[in-house]
Image: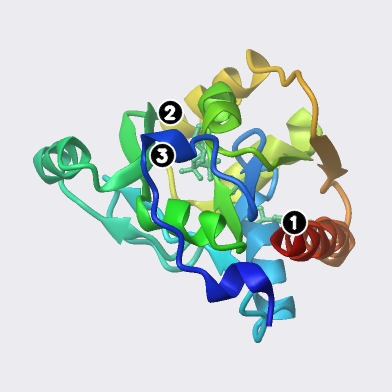
């Protein structure tokens, strides 16, 4: 067993940025396939205890078809946020999103945490996690439009707003892996699985130092 897994590290202000484990931030435009590649990896690595697939808290009714998340009403989310329930939270598409605080403990203890997050929170993630892997899932604009329409989770107006938002976002800085998901799910899924294998290997090494 890894040394890091034997030590239950306490987190305090001095422990930032959090080390040992890796935070894998899956980002990219709406409809590119973030939840799809995460779902692929979840199946692929079903028995892998070093990986944690973060269950997000969102102020959106649950929709198990695309993502299994927790739901809170707006006021309850704001209260939970004030109580320190989230490692990180943000707003987008008129919704609030939170990553439960125990992800910090997991990363500090050598696990690889995987979450679908906003591109806008990358600077905060860089401050919080020493080992941050950013995976950008991409697809061409016409593919995005077609997939969002097919997904059917949002109204036509919401889909148009999501497509417009995507056009204004660009990524910069180190540690970004881009995966084109214009082709079959399995192709992007395998590339993502390879990123996770590397993150687990890195985390194993870092726990032994
Ligand atoms: N490679 C693919 N080929 C065909 N359809 C896909 C592919 N990847 C994702 N989809 C579909 O496209 C839609 C958007 O994917 P999703 O994973 O929800 O994207 P995101 O989380 O980035 O918004 C979903 O309906 C999903 O099933
Ligand atoms: O700031 P951005 O990078 O544009 O991201 C905005 C939001 O879109 C995604 O959420 P969600 O999974 O609910 O939406 P999606 O499936 O349509 O991408 C992502 O996790 C962010 O919460």
Instruction: Give residue 138's quadrant in the image.
Output: top right
Whole-angstrom CA distance, mark 3 to mark 1, is 45 Å
Residue 150, percent across and down? 60, 52
The reply to whether the C-beta atoms of the residues labelled 3 and 1 are less than 8 Å apart is: no
Residue 154, percent across and down? 43, 43
| Residue for point 48% across, 67% down | 65
| Residue for point 62% across, 62% down | 110
Asked whether mark 2 and ligand 2 are closer than 8 Å, the reply comes as no
Instruction: Give residue 140's quadrant in the image.
Output: top right
Indicate the secondary structure of the residue bearing disc 2. helix
Nearer-the-camera pick, 35 or 54: 54
Q: Is residue 155 left or right of residue 45?
A: left
Whole-angstrom CA distance, mark 1 to mark 2, is 46 Å
Residue 194, percent across and down? 87, 61
Residue 9, percent across and down? 46, 60
Check disc 1 and report the residue beneath it. Answer: 206
Other-residue count near label 3 (Cα within 10 Å), few / some / many at <14 / 14–19 / ≥20: few
Dot 1 or dot 2: first in sequence order is 2
Check disc 3 and report the residue beneath it. Answer: 155
Indicate the secondary structure of the residue bearing disc 1. helix
Check disc 2 and report the residue beneath it. Answer: 157
Other-residue count near label 1 (Cα within 10 Å), few / some / many at <14 / 14–19 / ≥20: some
| Residue for point 49% across, 59% down | 54
Q: Is residue 193 left or right of residue 104?
A: right
Farthest residue, direction top: 168
Quarter of the C terminus within the rendering = bottom right
């Amino acid at each position: 067993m890894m040394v890091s897994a034997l030590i239950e590290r306490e987190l305090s202000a001095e422990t930032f940025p959090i080390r040992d484990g890796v935070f894998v931030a899956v980002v990219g435009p709406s409809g590119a396939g973030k939840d799809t590649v995460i779902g692929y990896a979840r199946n692929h690595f079903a028995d892998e205890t070093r990986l944690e697939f973060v269950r997000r808290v969102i102020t959106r009714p649950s929709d198990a078809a695309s993502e299994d998340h927790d739901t809170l009403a707006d006021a309850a989310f704001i209260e939970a946020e004030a109580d320190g329930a989230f490692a990180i939270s943000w707003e987008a598409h008129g919704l609030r999103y939170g990553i439960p605080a125990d992800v910090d403990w997991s990363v500090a203890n050598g696990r690889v945490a995987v979450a679908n997050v906003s591109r806008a929170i990358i600077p905060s993630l860089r401050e919080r996690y020493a080992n941050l892997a950013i995976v950008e899932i991409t697809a061409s604009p016409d593919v995005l439009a077609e997939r969002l329409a097919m997904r059917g989770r949002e109204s036509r107006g919401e889909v148009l707003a999501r497509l417009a938002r995507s056009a204004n976002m660009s990524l910069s800085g180190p540690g970004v892996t881009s995966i084109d998901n214009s082709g079959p799910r399995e192709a992007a899924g395998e590339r993502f699985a390879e990123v996770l294998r590397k993150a687990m290997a890195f985390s194993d090494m870092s726990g032994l130092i």
